[in-house]
Image: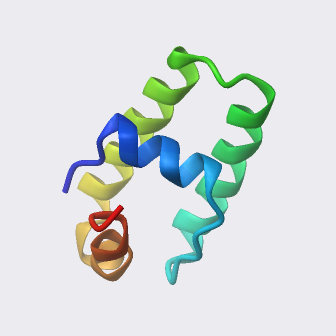
């Protein structure tokens, strides 16, 4: 389960819904940060944080990841 920079940007610029509340909360925070500073550094940091989250909570986010994988 790895998210690319392209997928991360689509997530941060889009309005996708997730079943896992922790992922939804994290995405809301990341979208706000990216809206304030849409730099490559913020995008890379967001991608890294998403990948850490998916690695840690694989079993909880499988359904949401399948949606992200199609982006």
Above or below residue 67? Residue 30 is above
The residue at 68%/46% (across/down) is 31
Between residue 50 and residue 36, name the one nearer to us: 36
Hey, which residue is sitting farthest left in the picture? Answer: 1
Residue 25 quadrant: bottom right
Left or right, 49 with reference to 55: right
Horizontal and vertical percent for residue 26?
60, 54
Above or below residue 9? Residue 57 is below
The residue at 57%/23% (across/down) is 42
Which quadrant of the figure contains the C terminus?
bottom left
Above or below residue 18? Residue 42 is above
Which quadrant of the figure contains the N terminus?
bottom left
Between residue 4 and residue 54, name the one nearer to us: 4
Left or right, 66 with reference to 15: left
The residue at 51%/83% (across/down) is 19
Horizontal and vertical percent for residue 55?
24, 53
Horizontal and vertical percent for residue 56?
29, 56
Residue 47 quadrant: top left
Above or below residue 56? Residue 35 is above
Horizontal and vertical percent for residue 38?
66, 25
The residue at 73%/22% (across/down) is 37
């Amino acid at each position: 389960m790895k998210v690319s920079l392209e997928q991360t940007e689509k997530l941060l610029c889009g309005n996708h819904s997730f079943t896992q509340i922790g992922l939804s909360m994290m995405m809301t925070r990341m979208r706000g940060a990216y809206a304030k500073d849409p730099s490559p550094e913020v995008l890379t940091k967001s991608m890294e944080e998403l990948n850490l989250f998916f690695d840690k909570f694989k079993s909880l986010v499988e359904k949401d990841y399948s949606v992200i994988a199609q982006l």
